[in-house]
Image (tube, grey):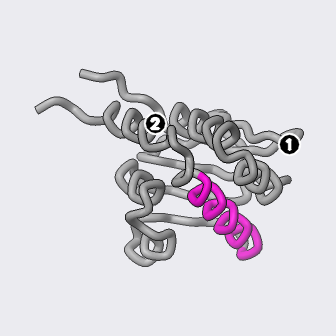
Amino acid sequence: MPDVKPFAWFLGRSLSTLREEMTPAYDRLVQEIRGRTVRLSVDAEPDHVIEESGSIRVVSTPLSFDVEFRASRPVLKALVGGRLTFLDGLLRDRIHLQGSIEDLLVFHDALQTYLRGAVRCPSMPGLLGEFEASAETPP
């Protein structure tokens, strides 16, 4: 049985991949979330994304946050894989968002930047596959 990789593992690796393979998208993402903390919960596993000194850090310690995003691994995989739009995820209650209107608009733009960059990273499909496979159990 494979070890289940936490969401923080995938998030950290995906941000590093974005920084290395699609630097303009990473730099834009840093600018978009500047000064905000985003709480991302995938399968009830909360992690926080913060921008500091021109880079993005992922921390698992509880922090106050400006935006909260909650979804499951399959929803995340569909978003990153381009099979689900952000709007469809919200309308189908597959994504939960909380925050002020201004912060949610900033988060939306930042998420779109991340996803547009991620789908263009050659290493992202393998990374996403490794993350998804880590949660699967053998028959």
Is residue 5 shown left or right of residue 97?
A: left
Q: In the drawing, does residue 88 fall left or right of residue 138?
A: right
x and y percent of residue 55 in the render?
Answer: 80, 40
**Against 66, is 133 above or below?**
above
Q: CA distance from mark 2 to mark 1?
A: 24 Å
Which range of residues does the magenta coloring cover? 101-117
Front residue of 110/116: it is 116
Instruction: Give the number of the disc on residue 54.
Output: 1
Q: Are marks 2 and 1 in contact (CB under 8 Å)?
A: no
In percent of the image, x 45 and y 59: which residue is there?
79
Return the x and y of residue 122 as percentages of the image width and height: 51, 43
Q: Secondary structure at mark 1?
A: loop
At a point 43% along the width and 43% down the height, the residue shown is: 125
Q: Quadrant of the N terminus?
A: top left
Q: Is residue 93 above or below residue 56?
A: below
Q: Position of residue 48 (x, y in %)?
A: 66, 43
Question: What amino acid is labelled 1 in the image?
Answer: Gly
**Circle 2: is it few (<14), some (14-19), or many (20+) Cα within 10 Å?**
some
Figure quadrant of residue 32: bottom right
Residue labelled with disc 2? 127
State the predominant SS element of the stretch in magenta. helix
Counting residues from the start of the chain, the first of labels 2 and 1 encountered is 1
Q: How busy is the neighbourhood of tag 1: few (under 14 within 10 Å), some, or many (20 plus)?
A: few
Which residue reaches farthest left? 139
Using the image as rendered, state which of residue 4 and residue 15 is in the foreground. Answer: 15
Query: Can residue 96 be seen at all in this image of the molecule?
Result: yes
- Percent across and percent down for residue 139 are 10, 32
Residue 66 inside the magenta-drawn segment: no
